[in-house]
Amino acid sequence: METKDIILELRTKKGLSQDELAEKLYVTRQAVSRWENGDTIPNTETLKALSNLFDVSINTLLGSPRKLICQCCGMPLEDSTISREINGDFNEEYCKYCYADGNYRYDNIDELIEVCVKHMSNEEFSPEEVRKYMKGLLPQLNYWKKYSQLGENEFCNFKRKLVEEINELKIEGMPKVDTLYSLEGNKVNLEYRLPNGQYTKFLNENETYFCNQLECEFGGERCFGIVANMDFILVSTYEENGINPELVLYKKR
């Protein structure tokens, strides 16, 4: 189906007139009419609003031009299995089993492989066959690609060493780091003010980083934020929701 037919069908199923849909989206009835006639396609922000209103993914609204698979486990994605952000928006990169409530469920590739073996092995595919298949597939997916050169046991060792390096920095007021969580760059890519007055971001929003947020030992409203990968360690402080971030340390590894 084309976008024009999908919007018409979803609007009709919800029992909305063009005027009522327009009111909910803060657009004109004429705009809705143009969408349903195929004259125009809603812009990105309106597609997000339609996605929330009709509880379908943007990919579905556009006629499913992409064959979505979870970039963590490789599961084919449908609207019923696509993950969501904390605010309810669809995250079309991951399934709801690998990413939920703003957090990734897996940071150990071997653990995920064994989960897949448990659920995918059957009379047709033995556990050994599933394990071999997943060991070949997962390193090709975006979530794991950054660390694909690490061996099966090296991933956990790398993460443990990273925690040790961060604690060795002994940053005043920052508590000891016990663990790191996997997050996409677009969730933690704060904009920092440089000494020359310009603002900049340091992260690739499509990459996965190891992160944590810690309350300052001295109290107050500011927290410490940690972002790290194979190449660097970044430590900053900020207020609630990342407001007024200040760079404390950026260290090449």
Image (cartoon, helix red, strand yellow):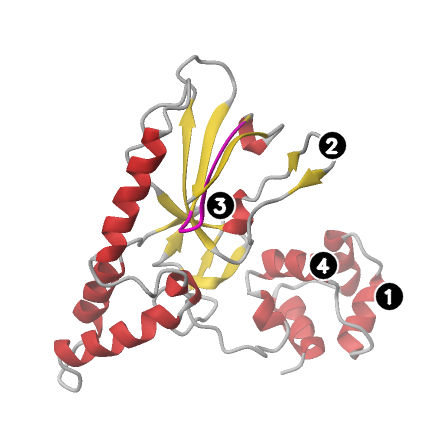
Name which residue lies at 43% across and 20% down. 216
Q: CA distance from mark 1 to mark 4?
A: 15 Å
From the top left corner, tell me how far across and down residue 250 is, in percent. Answer: 51, 37
Q: Which residues are magenta?
A: 229-237
Q: Which residue is mark 2?
A: 196
Query: Does the rendering let one see residue 74?
Result: no
Three-letter residue code for mark 1: Gln
Three-letter residue code for mark 4: Thr
Query: What element does badge 3 sit on?
Result: loop
Q: Which residue is mark 3?
A: 86
Number of residues whose C-alpha sits closer than 10 Å to that of mark 4, classed few (under 14), some (14–19) or many (20 or more) = some
Report the side of 53 relative to 109 (left or right). right
Q: Which residue is mark 4?
A: 46
Report the side of 43 relative to 180 (left or right). right
Q: Which residue is mark 1?
A: 30
Number of residues whose C-alpha sits closer than 10 Å to that of mark 2, classed few (under 14), some (14–19) or many (20 or more) = few
Report the side of 136 relative to 195 (left or right). left
Disc number lying in front (1 or 4): 4
Q: CA distance from mark 1 to mark 3?
A: 33 Å
First of labels 4, 2 by sequence position: 4
Disc number lying in front (4 or 2): 2
Find residue 34 and report its image quarter: bottom right
Query: What element does badge 4 sit on?
Result: helix
Q: Residue 251 versus residue 39: which sits nearer the camera?
A: 251
